[in-house]
Image: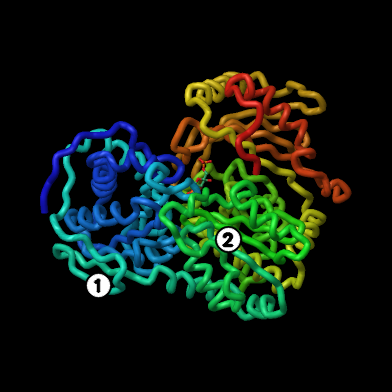
Amino acid sequence: MKTVSTTPYNDQKPGTSGLRKKVPVFQQPNYAENFIQSIFDSLEGFEGKTLVIGGDGRYYNREVIQKALKMAAASGFGKVMVGKGGILSTPAASHVIRKYGAFGGIVLSASHNPGGPTEDFGIKYNIGNGGPAPEKITDAIFARTKVIDSYKIVDADDVDLDAIGSVDLAGMTVEIIDPVADYADLMETLFDFSAIRALIGSGFRVVIDSMSAVTGPYAVEILEKRLGAPQGSVRNAEPLPDFGHHHPDPNLVHAKELYDDVMSADGPDFGAASDGDGDRNMVVGKGMFVTPSDSLAVIAANATLAPGYAGGIAGIARSMPTSAAADRVAEKLGIGMYETPTGWKFFGNLLDAGKATVCGEESFGTGSNHVREKDGLWAVLFWLNIIAARKEGVKDIITKHWAEFGRNYYSRHDYEEVDTDAANGLMANLRDKLATLPGQRFGALTVSTADDFAYNDPVDGSVSKNQGIRVLFEGGSRVVFRLSGTGTSGATLRVYVERYEPDAARHGIETQEALADLIAVADEIAEIKARTGRDAPTVIT
Ligand code: G16
């Protein structure tokens, strides 16, 4: 064991989901080591305990895993469980932490961001419940990174990450595990695999685009091997360090090929895509793209059709910018509804306390109390279970859902890589205006309230402020503004636009058209074009 002197880096503040930076930033001397040691220094009582390490297989994954293993050994962990090849999807890592009672886990991913020598990498710490570390831990980690002066590491050969089994690393056990088996078994306990198998056997065509990222092996095992879909139903199934130069982001821009295929006359009946680390999902049915907010609402409304949720759900949680579609389901079911800041870490307490069973975010994330991360394949299987049980396609299910609950027209406009000062100025200007907005009229729209969202955690009483500017209009429409906490260059402004339409006769309008007046008002209030110099968003979802 050796102790290596180091000096702090001043840019290691974890964002919405861990520390995400370009690979060359992580390759600076001691950069990854500083952050990993800061994680260990912020934890107590892990001596002799188990740590789980897994990543999405992106460029630099293996190198950082070797460093983390040697540092875990030097810091006194008793055992580290690692997915074969250094691979564990984020939900699978969460499951492994929970199943084996590990102390915590290190998840190496930059999620949906591109991978490669000059692209993105990330490190995140998950606690013993399997979920992302709460703010008090990420704050402690950041504080530590600012003063760190040394780290501990053992001088040892690299561990063979591709050989399943246990080896000794300077007195610590390293167990290389099958990354897929535990997770696939868990899915089989939650969903009606025989009904889904029968659906697929009847000719219902399902395709999953794994985007050359981590879900490939999971989707092949579950969809093709256990559920009987024809070989090739999982596309881009091999995880590649650069994701085949794709952007592994399951949305209408980056999964357009899949979308177009499902929409074509002789295309598949159902398509789904996942992201770099397997926690996001996109669901497309014939003639119908499902927004993540609607997906949460439909899953919640139909939850009892899946065996794992047959007893009903205790409550629903959604992030603030996510549409209120799920709120109407919670109201009807007479169960709790929780509105949290953006970031899956805020759901952990609600899930642990049994207040919420199902959670979701507009950012293509849905999940439940089966793990403590959002879970892409889980959402896909939930949809297939619902389709199999209701014997209806996606379009019918969604249309009937809207007819029953009303439709929340919803869209997110992203302005990526905006000048950081311009973006901060835009948000500061909005904050300054908040008090003057209520009562102001913009065409037919009148502002009812405007605030900067703050969250009071009902379980531990912690307060999280400045979580996004909300401008609510009379009648229930709203626009929300916040800066992304996951980008790695410049700032990303997110504008979330929502209108509630109870009248089924008005549910067939094209989304951007239905929201056009709100989109114009968002620009007027926030001065987006003037302050960012952009005429149009980079991505619309
Ligand atoms: C992460 C978080 C999510 C969040 C998303 C977008 O997802 O886990 O909770 O909604 O980022 O965050 P932002 O709007 O700050 O960019 P992922 O899939 O990137 O880990």
Question: Which residue does the numbered mark 1 point to in the structure image?
Answer: 166
Q: How is the image coloured?
A: rainbow
Which part of the image, by quadrant, shows the N terminus?
Answer: bottom left
Q: Nearer the viewer, residue 508 or 47?
A: 508
Residue 381 in the image, given as x and y percentages of width and height: 60, 67
Please tell me which of labels 1 and 2 falls first in the chain. 1
Q: Quick check: can you spot residue 486?
A: yes
The vertical placement of 405 against 369, above or below, is: above
Question: Which residue does the numbered mark 2 point to in the structure image?
Answer: 209
The disc labelled 2 sits on which kind of residue? Asp
User: Going by the picture, which residue comes out furthest to the front?
Assistant: 244
Q: Residue at x 41, y 44 (%)?
A: 120
The vertical placement of 32 against 86, above or below, is: above
Q: Secondary structure at mark 2?
A: strand
Residue 491 in the image, given as x and y percentages of width and height: 50, 31
Residue 19 in the image, given as x and y percentages of width and height: 38, 43
Alpha-carbon distance for marks 1 and 2? Answer: 33 Å
Q: Is mark 1 within 8 Å of ligand 1?
A: no
The vertical placement of 5 against 296, above or below, is: above
The answer to whether residue 497 is left or right of residue 78 is: right
The answer to whether residue 503 is left or right of residue 20 is: right
Q: Quick check: can you spot residue 136?
A: no
Q: Secondary structure at mark 1?
A: strand
Q: Residue at x 49, y 33 (%)?
A: 465
Q: Is mark 2 within 8 Å of ligand 1?
A: no
**Mark 2 residue crowding within 10 angstroms, few (<14) / some (14–19) / many (20+):** many
The answer to whether residue 476 is left or right of residue 63 is: right
